[in-house]
Amino acid sequence: DTGVSQDPRHKITKRGQNVTFRCDPISEHNRLYWYRQTLGQGPEFLTYFQNEAQLEKSRLLSDRFSAERPKGSFSTLEIQRTEQGDSAMYLCASSLLELFFGEGSRLTVL
Amino acid sequence: GNSVTQMEGPVTLSEEAFLTINCTYTATGYPSLFWYVQYPGEGLQLLLKATKADDKGSNKGFEATYRKETTSFHLEKGSVQVSDSAVYFCALSVNRDDKIIFGKGTRLHILP
């Protein structure tokens, strides 16, 4: 499968714990995006990278959130000290000319 | 700012009915417009797009025309099928390759 893959697909954690999500984009895609989607809402932009450079961060991305793409290939999104409001589906997408989405990582914070 | 407003769902239709899902946008500059679809248990997929005024995007029997004068990009299909049941998102990007801004989505149920 050569699509965008995300891991883990589901994560249940207790409030205050740290979690990390990984995204492997389509190999030749230089842009990588993170979005968050809650029930009944459209995806909300969080941040994006061109190669290894993080070009834009949304105001939604509090200082507890950090994203990296160290070698311009895979990316990680870490959430520190999780809160119940962080429960959502975290979507990764990559693009060359068109955006391709992964199936998402669902986070549940108890 | 840049935003997309689409009709609220759920929309329930019988098979072979005509479908319209309304979408209007607000944007600085000249946006590209998109419709994405999310089938149950699957990731978001691009359904169709239009990059300039009066362009018509089409795919799988769905169509949408970029109307600059009414800032709209309504999704239409002449005869829906049960397999079209999904959530549909209208979206825009202002600069080529820029981030995409999504509407809240419209859930569509097609009854056999």
Image (cartoon, rainbow, N blue to C red):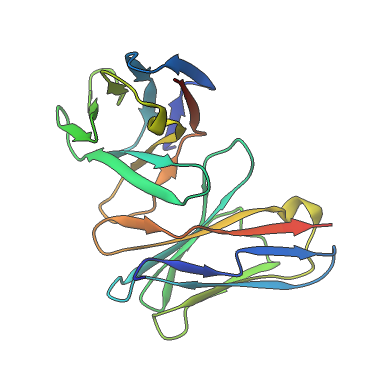
- Spot the residue most to the bottom: A71
Residue A43 in percent (x, y) is at 52, 46
Q: Hey, which quadrant is residue A98 in on the image?
A: bottom left
Total tally of numbered discs in the picture = 0
In-image side of B16 versus A56 (left or right) = left
Which percent across, then down, holds residue A76? 55, 75
> Residue drawn 20% across and 40% down?
B51
Q: Position of residue A39 (x, y in %)?
A: 64, 40
- Residue B69 position (above or below residue B62): above
The residue depicted at 43 percent of the width and 34 percent of the height is B88
Q: Is residue B57 above or below residue B24?
A: below
> In the rendered image, which quarter is residue A80 located in?
bottom right
**Quick check: can you spot residue A88?**
yes
Residue sitting farthest toward the front: B112
Residue found at x 23% / y 28%: B63
Q: Nearer the viewer, residue A47 or A43?
A: A43
- In the image, A105: left or right of B89? right
Q: Quadrant of the N terminus of chain B?
A: top left
The quadrant in which the C terminus of chain B is found is top left
Quarter of the image holding residue A27? bottom left
Q: Is residue B31 visible?
A: no
Residue at the (84%, 57%) spot, across then down: A110
Q: Is residue B46 above or below residue B16?
A: below
Which of A93 and B39 lies nearest the eye of the viewer? B39
Q: Residue B58: x percent and y percent? A: 20, 34
Image position of A52 (left or right of A91): left
Q: Is residue A98 above or below residue B10?
A: below
B98 and B111: which is toward the camera: B111
